[in-house]
Amino acid sequence: MISNFFTPISAFCLFAVTWLMYYATIRIQQHLQIKRLGGYSPIVNGWLPFGIDVVIRGVRMSSKCQRFVFTADPENIKAVLATQFNDYGKGEDFMHVWQDFLGHGIFATDGEEWAKSRQLLRPYFVQTRVRDLELFEKHVQQLLHLIKEQGQEIDISELFYRYTLDAATEFLLGRSVGSLGNAESQFAQAFNDVQRIQNTRTRAGPFQRLVPSKKFWKGLKVMDSFIEPFIQEALSYSPPKLGEKEARSTDGSTWLRSVATFTRDRRVIRDQIVNILLAGRDTTAGTLSFLFKELSAHPKVYAKLRREILERIGKRQAPTYEGLKDMPYLQHCISETLRLYPAVPFNIRRALKDTTLPRGGGTDGLSPVGIMKDDDIGYSPRLLHLNAAMYPAASASSPPVLEFSPERWETWTPKPWQYIPFNGGPRICIGQQFALAEIGYTAVRIIQRFDRLEKYWGIEDDIVKSEIVLSPANGVKIGFYRAADS
């Protein structure tokens, strides 16, 4: 009788009832905890299992009782990045997915490990180092040599990515990969492949093992093979000897030598090199690409910017760090580009414990929102920057939010946490001033030589793509006309 009672159907029913009771218990406990912490934010419901239809629309997903909360509220972003910093982090899942590429570097760790990384890296980004702009000049001259003159169409974005890779590798290692001189650079191609596949693996979530990754592993091997000899050379000296070598160096200090005086762990050094390389190449190249795309579409802005540059430093003189800061219209053009196209347009933090967001709950949206441990919080600097509520009503003196207008910065100053192109709080970009100096220096040297741009891209090219960082989806096809007296 007993064996007849436990048929496959009855066993399945028993399992289903048990699972439903367990799931209901978890959901009730979660509901009570969220209400205790604050309340719910507005919810977008889906019609398909696990909110698949909503995920496709990019709004909210739900699986394993885990929530995804999206916010563009400045107060919530401030809480996640600063005032409740210890409540949120990258999370173990992120660290696991990115470990093969970024290892235990500054962008893939939390807590004490992250703090040690920042302490290790920060000294080299002090202002005295950033002020040394000679690093850029050699590579800018190579870049200028490759720009076709008299209006011939080129994809300047492609050149910017090669240029910033060369500058970043020289800064980090003391030697450039030379991708401007060799479009088929093995390292450059490997770095591109690894980033592209890493982005796909990240988006695949639990299905990342199904992503074809042969080029990923091959690319990592090429990257590590290139980097390893530099690490080996740096570690062949004791820290005191390395310090003496730095002091006597005629080719300038390098980041690698500096870091090798603080740690002898080659894996730590390798991971930090790759992390800084990722930030140092793509973010700057993307911003330069968007800047010149907008300048090609706004000839009056380009002419005004060129006048400022020629009046302040002339047609041939290289700018100094102070000189760049002394050109307000140049700074406005860069700020406006970062307002419309922040390098990292979307980011995620995971709740490391039960906590709250200060706004979004209640009928008026002004009450706290309860956040459970392991909930993911998505925030978008780009949506934040394009929120019309932060700007005066459109008028003759206040251009529309979506319009590229450096002049807006003459009368408009964003309030704290309304403009975060370099993130904010303890994890604010340590290379911010270095990046701004490289963008400004590069733009000045190009604009000094060319007095006019020709726009070859159309409305079909006016789209962006967001992999790890934001970039023009179809490149930036423009022409440069060299000034007769340059």
Image (spheres, grey):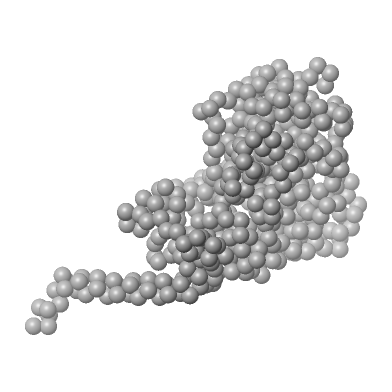
Q: Quadrant of the C terminus?
A: top right
Place residue 440 in its image quadrant. top right
| Placement of 8 over or under 381, stated as above or below | below
Residue at (75, 44) in percent of width and height? 436
In front here: 96 or 270? 96
The percent coordinates of residue 461 (x first, y second) are 54, 29
Residue at (45, 52) in percent of width and height? 59
In front here: 136 or 72? 72
How many marks on residues?
A: 0
Q: Visible in this render: residue 413? A: yes
In the visual, does 286 lie left or right of 237? left
In front here: 362 or 72? 362
In the visual, does 458 lie left or right of 23? right
| Placement of 443 over or under 270, stated as above or below | above
The percent coordinates of residue 222 (x first, y second) are 60, 46
In the visual, does 317 lie left or right of 199? right
Residue at (32, 57) in percent of width and height? 49
The percent coordinates of residue 224 (x first, y second) are 63, 51
